[in-house]
Image: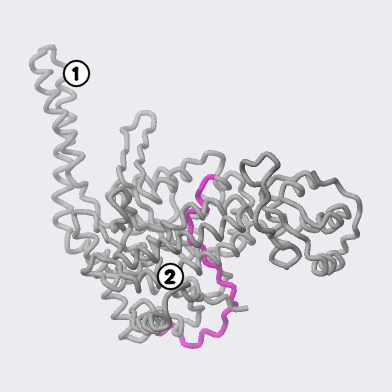
Amino acid sequence: MDTPFTFPPHVGGVSAKKRNFDEWVDTTASCRISEAVRAAFGVSLGMSWVACLAAINSALRGKVSVKVNNDWIEPANAFVVLCAESGAGKSPINAFYKAPLLAFQKKWNDTHRARFCLERSRQVQLKKRLAALERKVAKTEDDAKVEEWLQEMAALREEILCVPGGHELEIFVDDCTNKSLIECMHQQGGRVAVMEAEASLFRHIVNAKPMSPIVDTLLKAFSGERIQSKKSGESSTVIEQPVLALNVMVQPPVIAQLGRNKEIMGRGLLGRILFYVDELPVGGRDAGGVVLEAIKAEYTSIIQAIVERVETSNEQIVLELDADALLLWEEWRDKVERRLCLRGGEVSVWDEWRGKAARHLLHIAAFVHMFECPESKVSIDANTMRLAVQLGDSFYEHYEKIVRLICPERGEKIAVKALRSRRLYEEGRFQSRDLQRMCGVLRQEANAAIDWLWRRGAVRELFPPRFGQRGGRPSSPEYEIVDGVWNDLAARHGALRVPMGGLR
């Protein structure tokens, strides 16, 4: 069944505004290009949109920020993971959206090759002079000379850090270890991207061992937290504002394997990812992957204009939200936080994603804004934010699919145990803690079972939460059994009711 990249209508606002917004969306370059690429390659519209966002993310690599207020300037960076079956068209569509970035990289390196040579030569000269002074200091006993040389050595070290290393522009990295990833980020001023149609670097996340250093690196590189790496016998590598724009396409078994890695769960990494699940088995892409030349030229010019602005800017590009865009962002943030809280606790990753939802929307809004206005205009307007809200809603829906893909059986097995319980059925209502005690499971597992029953209509949530006799904090949400649906599910799963456990 097709899982479209839907654009649910934004709550609030008059119909005239909605019509104007719909008309505006139809004229945007992002909508026009995504639709043309979808038609050319025969993929889902969602895959085309996500691949386009991945290309923008790779072009920016955190060089653009969004100013929310005087104390909050958010770097626009994202981890984007598209999950699709083999043969869904991941490789050709990734190659199309990545091509202008590679072309810009080659042109940039060819243009600045002489400068790179001079920078490397200067670095070599400085290091040779530093080594010579170190030898002199080791041999002489003249204190005055030693003091003079030490001061010169300190100045040389400072200059070595400030002088560019003469490294060519490398926008992308592929499959690499934690050490090589840090080295590459350091060479590129702290900013690199991954944009692959395979698991690539994501494979190291899936197979991460306890306290794996690459997970810590990724967590810091998501939002630009300082990285300092030092190995025994080596000089320290410091990256003040590291950024990794992670964009990969994987197959469902990779996501399922990620869910089995208990070392990842609860470390905050999954909450930083924008997931999209493409469930459409696409076949017969008889269009041949030929995109209209006008569309291809338009996309190439936009992406290369973004990269040109990013690479030639000496400072961070800071965008601001106008008053209407700020209001829309605040409304969506509050809506998502409430929605996730009411249905929260299905698995621990819900809380992780909820905590990052407001930041995700800022990132998406910055991507859309830069694609529509690559060369000027620093204010994100209401239409851009409305489109970002719809994209954010779609990523929220697909995050639900990822949660179920990560732990597809755990909730169902516990739910079937609940269906078997005669005491639970006779009581007619229960809380998460009741399932925990009855089945001897953790809170996340009990909540996964409740989510499984809730999605099938077997339980409904009771409002408001009850307070204890002594007042204080409310108890956890309570669920009421929907008798007919509960019985049908019990019969379908052969769950004969037996005395099992007991309620509080």
Residue hosting label 2: 51
State yes or no: residue 286 in magenta. Answer: yes
Residue 296's place in the image compared with 385, above or below, is below
In primary-sequence order, the first of circles 1 and 2 is 2
Left or right? Give the position of 256 relative to 248: right
Q: Quadrant of the N terminus?
A: bottom right
Element marked by disc 1? helix
Q: Position of residue 364 (x, y in %)?
A: 39, 64
Q: Which residues are magenta?
A: 267-291
Residue 231's place in the image compared with 422, above or below, is above
Q: Quadrant of the C terminus?
A: top right
Q: Amino acid at mark 2?
A: Ala
Query: In percent of the image, x 34 and y 79: which residue is there?
Result: 28
Q: Which mark is residue 406?
A: none
State yes or no: residue 296 in magenta. Answer: no
Q: Which mark is residue 138?
A: 1
Query: In percent of the image, x 73 and y 51: which residue is there?
Result: 431
